[in-house]
Image (spheres, rainbow, N blue to C red):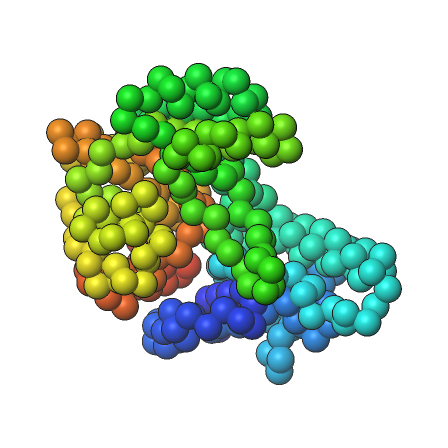
Amino acid sequence: MGKQVIIITYSGDITGMITQLRPQIEARGGEVLRFDTDRYPTDAHASLVQDGADERLRFTCGERTTVVGPDDAIWYRRARIAEKLPMSMAPQLRNGGMVEAKAQLRGLLAAAPCFVLDPPDLVRARGHKPAQLRLAREVGLATPRTLMTNDPAEARAFVASCPGGAVAKMLSAFNVFDERGEEQVVFTTSLTAEHLGKLDGLRYAPMVFQEKLVKRLELRVTVIGARMFTAAVDSQAMPGAETDWRERGVSLLRSWRAYTLPAEVERALGSYMRRIGMQYSAIDIVVEPDGRHVFLEANPAGECFWLEYNEPRFPLSTALVDVLLDAPGARRR
């Protein structure tokens, strides 16, 4: 039997990339099991058996059961663990079941006898923005002037020291709903006088403040194993995308173009990836008018596949399959 690939995701993950991976893996003699974490533990099953010299890690989802071996691979793509637990359960019991399910599944992945792209504990650890900026500086990448604080006076002084203005952003993603119950996304925000008058609210929650950069281009560098794919977009040409291109992400889908990184920036990003010990990352960089490349952040589980569906049509799925099946030279060692 060929290598088995277990894709850890959830049933609402409808990207075509997952279905596109299956025929590529099967064409190379591999097998695929999709494990939807929202169906676990109600309908999907995961277990670790230790009995004498025998140890087995097993996943079951739908009609398929897979026992994981050392030559197999796990792609930890997305997780919505235990979301299908009945809402009719007592809240305390439902929360307890969800906590236990998360502890077991993450523990099983930590104990997996095979390659995992990328271990969830590592994904969480490498998602900390302060650590990302510090490491970026250590490997020689430029970063924006930054303040992370819950001190209103310190924030006011920092913003005043930025002659070109400042932006605010969050350290984490969380749900914000309006009065109609519709989810609102918190994007990077260019600070105005009105915002500055509300900085006392920092005593309830800290924020990140950065100098406003003059942008010639914005880059998305997708790292998959030993390969880097860099795309550029002129966010300043799209009204509403000037501060955060994601606000007009759909409108910009066909505006991305392939981009060649300067050799010193590519080397620094390679050092960054070696230091974090991961195979995948989606890195955001701003190119200033003078050509300076400024590192913003590295999302250890960011989306990238629109860059395969649209221009520059990077072969991201093929690169991912190469890493999962351990093609020669594909994995970042």
Compared with residue 177, is residue 19 higher up or lower down, i.e. above or below? below
**Does residue 314 appear left or right of residue 272 in this picture?**
left
Q: Is residue 190 left or right of residue 32?
A: left
Q: Residue at x 39, y 56 (%)?
A: 303
Question: Nearest the camera: 160 or 290?
Answer: 160
Q: Is residue 229 visible?
A: no
Which quarter of the image is occupied by the C terminus? top left
What's the residue at 59%, 65% (across, down)? 180
- Observer-nearest of 8 and 202: 202
Residue at image x 36%, y 30%?
166
Residue 291: where, in percent of width, then height? 14, 32
* Total residue callouts: 0
201 versus 80 height, above or below: above
Question: Residue 201 lies in what quarter of the image?
Answer: top right
Name the spot of residue 284 as percent of width and height, x first.
32, 42
Residue 275 in the image, given as x and y percentages of width and height: 41, 32
Q: Is residue 271 left or right of residue 14?
A: left
Between residue 154 and residue 79, name the one nearer to us: 154
Residue 178 in view in this figure: yes
Horizontal side of 286 relative to 53 (left or right) equals left
Q: Position of residue 155 (x, y in %)?
A: 48, 22
Residue at 75% over, 53% down: 99
Eyeballing the image, is 88 above or below 47?
below
**Extreme residue toward the bottom, this view:** 63
